[in-house]
Amino acid sequence: MTTQQIYKLAVSLGMRADLRGPAEVKKYLERVKNKYEKLDAAARAEFDADKLFNPYSDTRVLNDESKKQIKKIVAGIDIGGAELLVADKIGGVDLVISHHPDGPALADLAGVMDLQSQVLAMYGVPINIAESVIKPRISEVSRSTSPANHNRTTDIAKILKMDYMCTHTVADNLGARFLFDLFERKEKELEYVEDILALLKSIPEYQEGARRKAGPVLFSGSPENHCGKIVVTEFTGGTSGSKEIYEKMSHYGIGTVIGMHMGEEHRKEAEKYHINVVVAGHMASDSLGMNLFLDELEKEGIEVVPLSGLIRVKRFKK
Ligand SMILES: [Fe+2]
């Protein structure tokens, strides 16, 4: 496979796993295309053409040296100059894949956050409410990522002539879909919040996360609380949403939120509105999604060297 083929595979896997469903994602892409066709020449020249087939602004190829065949990759949760130098030192590495976005994919992280309002709508929060709550937060994230030195690591990849890409929301979608399907299958067995914690701890990434003192924990509520309606709303869609959403969630019948991580202000709001919050653990959750993607590459005969917090678990047999 080439880097471009790996990128296209990542996008298609992310779209297939997307909690909104393939039809909604297709509609989203058609809307982008229609808008693009109405642009004038100057606006078209500035347009990021990847948006026509890739609905995830935080997933991009950041450096491509046009290598014929990718045989060995290094994959990590965060890639910086140190990880690129390690990849270079290992030898024979053709491509480095970061989970967290970098370069233009970091600058445009807020571009995937729309997904959150549609996922909330799927769980019963009216779309108009979900959208108006999330919109100010999207602007906030867009402003907060704007001053970063986005291309710092990408520049090192270019000097080292190392292919480099990031797969953020596509991997988070795979992790979210994995948990969504699991919670659906086990719905009848999940009565109390402690049942959710036990179920998460049956997953190898979370077992290892727990050994590293960063496994699933309860941020709000009690293990003896009834779960109520369980939602996987804080697992994909760029970054944390709006803290105003917990009031709406409690109003529209949501009982327990499963998330990767949660800040203190959000936690306080969730507690105030009686929402149980199970934080599954950031690195373990990011690893789950990346693993589901990396398995597909290993199936193609590509060797994967994990680093930077990635808890590598394989779910296929050769
Ligand atoms: Fe993450």
Image: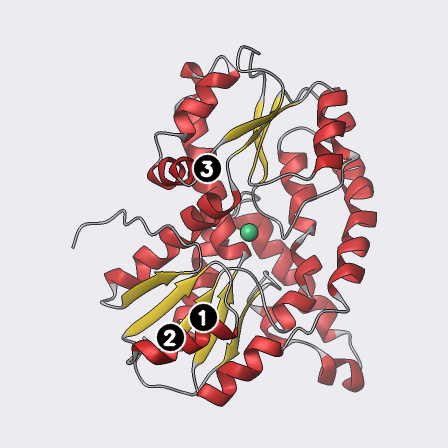
User: In this picture, is 201 found above or below 138?
Assistant: above
User: In this picture, is 109 found above or below 182?
Assistant: below
Percent across and percent down for residue 85 are: 43, 78
Q: Which residue is mark 3?
A: 213
First of labels 3, 1 by sequence position: 1
User: In this picture, is 296 found above or below 259?
Assistant: below
User: In this picture, is 81 found above or below 134?
Assistant: below
- Residue 1: assigned label: none
Task: Classify 10 Å Cα crowding around label 1: few (below 14), some (14-19), many (20 and above).
Answer: some
Name the element at disc 2.
helix
Q: Which residue is mark 1?
A: 83
Task: Indicate how the structure is coloured in the image.
Answer: secondary structure
Percent across and percent down for residue 156 are: 53, 82
Give the residue drawn at x 68%, y 65%: 108
Foreground residue among 244 and 18: 244
Give the residue drawn at x 74%, y 38%: 127
Is residue 17 among the parts visible in the rendering?
no
Circle 3/circle 1 CB separation < 8 Å:
no
Give, as a three-letter code, the residue at label 3.
Lys
Tag nearer the camera, 3 or 2: 3
